[in-house]
Amino acid sequence: MLSSERSFHVKQRSLCLGLAVVVVVVVVVVVVVVVVVVVVVVVAAATAAAVVLKLLFAIKKSEGKRTGLNV
């Protein structure tokens, strides 16, 4: 009887350890995905801001040429 109880506890411990490893892997994958999404959003926002600023500068420059003002 003791041998089967010991076997049960070993199986239970290995199952718990396996579950802990799965949880850690899932948490790491979620964190990596969140970091990648944040980096992509920041890069997209910076690119959009650069494009908008470039367009605004071009509009301002073209208006300056039309009115004769140097900007």
Image (tube, rainbow, N blue to C red):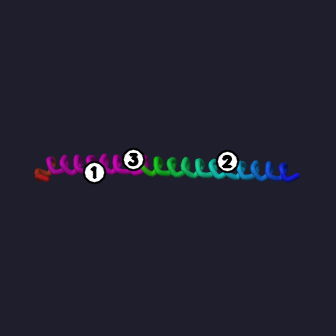
Q: Residues at badges 2 and 3 in contact (C-beta under 8 Å)?
A: no
Task: Identify residue for label 1.
Answer: 53
Secondary structure at numbered mark 1: helix
- Distance from Cα at disc 3 to Cα at disc 1: 14 Å
Q: Which segment is the magenta one?
A: 40-65
Give the residue type that dot 2 points to.
Gly
Image coordinates of residue 22 in percent, x first then y, are 64, 48
Q: Main secondary structure of the magenta part?
A: helix
Image coordinates of residue 62 in percent, x first then y, are 19, 46
Mark in the foreground, 2 or 3: 2
Give the side of residue 49 with respect to residue 19, left or right.
Answer: left
Toward the viewer: 4 or 59? Answer: 4
* Earlier-in-chain disc, 2 versus 3: 2
Crowd around label 3: few <14 · some 14–19 · many ≥20 (10 Å): few
Crowd around label 2: few <14 · some 14–19 · many ≥20 (10 Å): few
Image coordinates of residue 58 in percent, x first then y, are 22, 46
* Earlier-in-chain disc, 2 versus 1: 2
Task: Identify residue for label 2.
Answer: 18
